[in-house]
Image: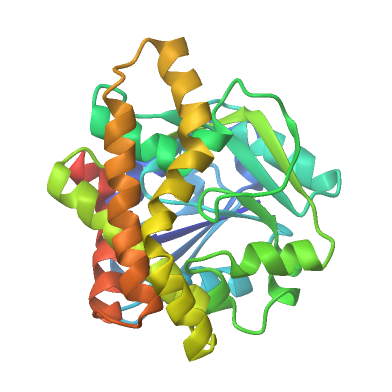
Amino acid sequence: MSIILPADRPETIMGVLRQLRIQTIVSGLEIVIATSNPAEFESLHASQYGFHSIKVLPMADDFTLGAARAKAMQAAGAACVFLGETHSFAAVPRWAELLVARHRDGWAVIVPGFRNANPASRLSWAGFLLDYGGWLERQPSGEIEYWPLNNSACDRLAILNSTDNPAHALSYGDQLILALRTAGHKVYFEPEAVLSHFNLSHLREWLDERYIAGHLIARARSNHWSWFRRWTHVLAAPAIALVLFGRVSGSAWRTIRARHLSWSILPLMLLGTITQAIGELLGYAHLGDIGSSERRMTEYEIHKVSYT
């Protein structure tokens, strides 16, 4: 399996590499690093960790996550590719083995079971449940309809053959999900392949991430829409928050009750969906600085542990 990691310096991926070195199939893992500072990664060698290989791909200083993932996807040597993050860590030694096994069974996308890596914070739980509440560990395995773009294992050729613009498809929105579904590909949820995910827990950055996520998703989704369709979504924006909250509130409440968490996580989640809806409203209207949103999201994605 090839594991894609956009990064800026070696320190940001050391925690990920330490967890990967204890995998049962460590010798079958290829690490593909997309970075604007390739010289800083020259000291990394596959033999240090027992990996099959390490590839370092040079990127522009202002690279976007979509561009980094697309370049790494095209350069990856394995048929199964994992879209990794600097703040997500394999939590069990058979994590990679289980994902590869499901890939060999013919599934185009395999979603791991998620665990909150910083569970002491209510903001962390609110963001975690909004982003990954549908794929928590201990839930039943099996075929699913929807999957998170980040932190999923994918069939490399299925991804590349489903889009003419991998950088766009691997950025934000649901374009890739819809393309794979149209092509007849199926998705499997493997909860035993547990992945531990860090989440923002400072209010200012937490709200900012929710806003720019909505902004980027709406812009990516509506790039080729007509004026009429975009403004229909702008007018419907007040309902977006309720739709987003409704999708996850049931599973979130069950998790809160099962883990004896604070009920105040629910209003924080509602605040998050309202903030995201504002971002989507401006995104569908094609207002706001999309370049700034891209830079801020890249900062959070690469250095998220620093904001927890």
Please tell me in which quadrant of the rendered image residue 181 appears.
bottom right
Left or right: residue 239 versus residue 212 is right
Res. 259 image quadrant: top left
**Residue depicted at x 39% and y 64%:** 237
Q: Is residue 134 left or right of residue 8?
A: right
| Tag count | 0
Residue 125 vs residue 153, the one in the foreground: 125
Q: Nearer the viewer, residue 264 or 148?
A: 264
- Between residue 38 and residue 193, name the one nearer to us: 193
Instruction: Say which residue appears at 44% left-offset and 67% top-offset.
Output: 217
Q: Where is residue 303 in the image (x, y as percent from the top left)?
A: 25, 52
One can see residue 38 in this view: no
Residue shown at the point (31%, 51%) measured from the top left: 274
Residue 10: where, in percent of width, then height? 30, 55
Q: In this view, does 296 lie above or below 197?
A: below
Is residue 105 in view? yes
Indicate the quadrant where residue 179 lies. bottom right
- Residue at image position (22%, 51%) is 207
The spot of residue 126 in percent (x, y) is 33, 34
Please determine whether, in this image, residue 101 is positioned above or below residue 58.
Answer: above
